[in-house]
Image: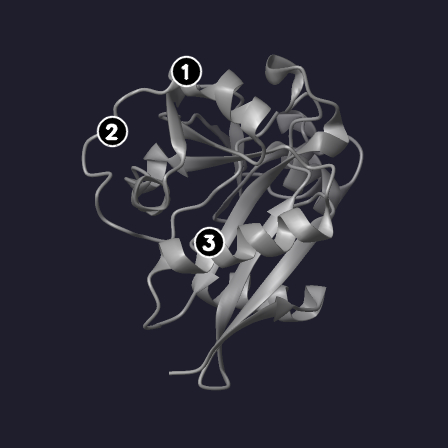
Amino acid sequence: MNLKLDWCSHRTARMAVECWHYSHSMPASKVVPIGVWEDERFVGAIIFSMGANQFLGNAHGLMKWQVCELTRVALRDHVTPVSRLLAIALRMLKKHCPGLRLIISYADCDQNHHGGIYAAGGWVYIGQVQTGGGTPKFRVRGRVMHGRSVHARFGTGAQRLPWLRQNVDPYATKVWTRGKHKYLMPLDKEMKRQIEPLRKAFPKRAGSESCDTSTPPG
């Protein structure tokens, strides 16, 4: 089988996300999308972005240009293990952005995801976040959206529930998360030494691979 990963357009990545990712929506921040082809058949996209949290790297002493998120793994039926696809995509990203030092990603407990793709790929699991409900999402017109996505789509005021009910959907509600499993991938030896003491045992069911990448709100 001929496997190919290459940079793809925002439009191509959006199509993959809308068709094959459970969120059906692109990240609101600037993205770096990588397309995946098997035997010249497009099977999806792997998407990195700045993430929804502007303070993403603060806990690790990093500037915002030194850290990013793996925010979407949007794949249709395919043959290559997701862990291999991620390994290739990470090498491409590291070469493209030599100042990048750390990748962060999350497995969404609301989707019953545990992070099998990260366990298989050697990521560092550092525990569960937003266990107390975290920053709420919004259910708008039957679709659950992060606050930043709501703002990007509907404009100023959209992250306030009264405004949403008055201007967009009278039945809009807040949705509280059950938490997310947080994973790190250091890209240099110094960062690896810093991150390694944070490592915890992988959560239950982390041995199976699934396309479960999601970005929590900041």
* Residue 6, placed above or below residue 53: below
Q: Which residue is mark 2?
A: 203
> Residue 28, how many percent across, how many down?
68, 45
47 displayed left or right of 21: right
Q: Is residue 141 visible?
A: no
**Hey, which residue is sitting farthest front in the picture?**
189
Name the residue that disc number 1 marks: 198
Compared with 14, 64 (above or below) is above
- Which quadrant of the figure contains the C terminus? top right
Q: Are marks 3 and 1 in contact (CB under 8 Å)?
A: no
Q: Nearer the viewer, mark 2 or mark 1?
A: 1
Callout 3 amino acid: Leu
Q: Earlier in the sequence, mark 3 or mark 1?
A: 3
Residue type at tag 2: Pro
Where 12 falls versus 191 (above or below)?
below
Which quadrant of the figure has residue 148? Answer: top right
Residue 134 or residue 172, whichever sits in front: 134
Residue at 37%, 45% (x, y): give it.
Answer: 121
